[in-house]
Image (cartoon, rainbow, N blue to C red):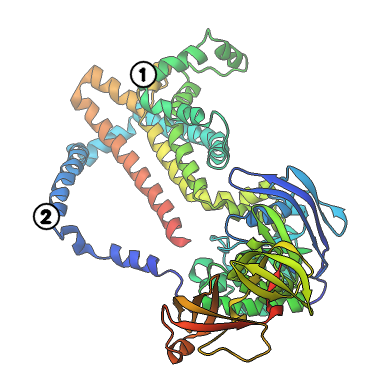
Amino acid sequence: MRGHRRGKVQVRGLWVDLKEFHLRQIDLDVAAGEYFVVLGPTGAGKTVLLETIAGLYRPGKGRISIDDEDITHVPPERRGIGFVYQDYALFPHLNVAENIAFGLKLRRADRETINERVTAMGQLLGIDHLLHRRPRTLSGGEQQRVALARALVVEPRLLLLDEPLSALDPETREELQRAMAHLHRELGTTTIHVTHDFEEAVALGDRIGVVHRGQVVQVGSPEEIFRKPASEFVARFVGARNIFRGRISGMDQGGYKMLSLDGVEIAVVTDLTGPVRASLRPEDIILSEEPLRSSARNCFQGRVADISDRGTVAYVTICVPPCFTCVVTRRSVEEMKLQDGMEVYIAFKAAAVHVF
Amino acid sequence: MADKQHPTDQKHLADKKRPLALFSDKMRVSFIVLGTILILFVAWPLLRTITSSSPAILWQTLLDREVHNAILLTFYTSLVATGIAFVCGVPLAYLLARVEFPGKQLIEGIIDVPVVVPHSAAGIALLMVFGRRSLLGQAFGTLGLKFVSATPGIVIAMLFVSLSLLVDSAREGFEAVDPRLERVARTLGASPWEAFWRISFPLAWRSILAGMILMWARGLSEFGAVVILAYHPMVAPVLLYERFESFGLKYARPVATLVILICLTAFVALRLTAGRKRDGT
């Protein structure tokens, strides 16, 4: 579509103090046209961050600018920022077309322009057959499409999405996630998307910023966050279940260093020495009944301490000690006849261990 | 995107549509009996009064100049009082619904005080502030506005005793509007005024209207405060009282019937219009 503006966003040293939420010293840079995901647990202050960028809260300190224009003290209606809430926040007294047209009417657009743009936006989002329905008669996914259309039809410089998929059932969520990726390719609107769901963040985000207790703790590409979490919190949050504290003695042994934890020596690849933390993703661990001959530098014998069934996969905890959690398919559990107390072997590559 | 969004809503609807549930157990039956006593207590005297006078006598009473002037004055003054409360009370209700501020509970208390004080006492209190010798009374007097024994006195008496009905109802209406709707409207380009007029006000309108109807009806029926500020010009309840005092029950009865009938008709008609709007949305 034509004419969609792509704002470059800068947030500098933002502080917000509300009763329940605080933001401390938030710095963010979002490039023009980028899809940026803010990832963090519930209560981390993500919604407040978005509402502050939109101008709905006043920051105690700090500066927000779009395209180098300082908008910190500009009222929300003059910022050109679209906003979509988790539970849609559609205007219940207006039908779908009127909801989408709301911003255009405020801009005193003539009726023809309004009709044309509402229809075009409805088609883009696949809701053009619903234009005369009332919001409450729509399904969740349909309502969220309307909310997206309403925000995008006024061609915002920046689109803010507050957990836009969280209220939807898994099937609809996936469908809408694809629709949103498509939408971003089509329009290229600079987007900040807030979520607590790592998979959603990976699927949509060009880059991810992880927020914890009102602070941005890591910014990077999904791969960076996934493979090299900057802190224990990030590692746990993105689902690396094996997180250890140990010590690296400093002796390089042909490209490896040895990390000692709980009396076990693990080969790792890192520049760090001294007390460190390490993470290992469950899917990087290979589980076997016999010792494996492979390129994996790390191989240990241990006992099954726990098997937690998750439908198609199961998380199996093996204590050497220390305890490692690995993920295997349900079928493997059955074929290997895994059960508590059973002796097994685990193997993983030195490169799979992320030391930080 | 299947339409399986509000299964609970449908369940509620289904529940409401089961009339037999009224008599489903002994507890409900005894509750029905107890409730009926109260309904009869209200309905029986009203019905008895309405049926006590023949239509001919009612018609004659209505033609009585004093009577229909009093009824028109009552309608008019209560409408003005409701109008004043609408202009000042709806913004107040919005603030009470949206903003936390020190002393908020005090403000809420002040709004509701007129409900708990005897209305004759309220009339005395108003007299002390708006009376001829009071500062405010004199100030208004220079503008040609007098309250004692005058129409404006009736209006402020009605306003005083019934404004809480409108303010409380409007506040509940605004509280039911998700503040995020206003925020979204702001991000779409609405100024605070536009967000109010296009979103909050229309969504709270039903409650505001219900509050206005209640307030207007309450104003019609006010006697205590009005009689102290303005015995004359006579509103319907005062006229009724005077007829009863001076001529007895026989002469008061047709006036009472007429007043009850007119108020009931107006009240029911307004509730129906408001109710139809409710279904229409």
Q: Position of residue A13 (x, y in %)?
A: 79, 49
Q: Earlier in the sequence, mark 2 or mark 1?
A: 2
Which residue in the protein does label 1 denote?
B120
Residue at 46 percent across and 71 percent down: it is B5
Q: Chain of mark 1?
A: B
Which residue in the protein does label 2 denote?
B26
User: Which corner quadrant of the image does residue A114 belong to?
Assistant: bottom right
Q: Is residue A295 above or below residue B236?
A: below
Q: Position of residue B123 (x, y in %)?
A: 41, 18
The kind of secondary structure element at disc 1 is: helix
Callout in the foreground (2, 1): 2
Q: Quadrant of the N terminus of chain A?
A: bottom right
Say whether residue B114 is visible: yes
Q: Same chain for the residues at labels 2 and 1, yes or no?
A: yes
Q: Residue furthest right?
A: A68
Mark 1: few, some, or many residues within 10 Å (few <14, many ≥20)? some
Report how far apart the C-alphas of labels 2 and 1 lie in the structure.
Answer: 45 Å
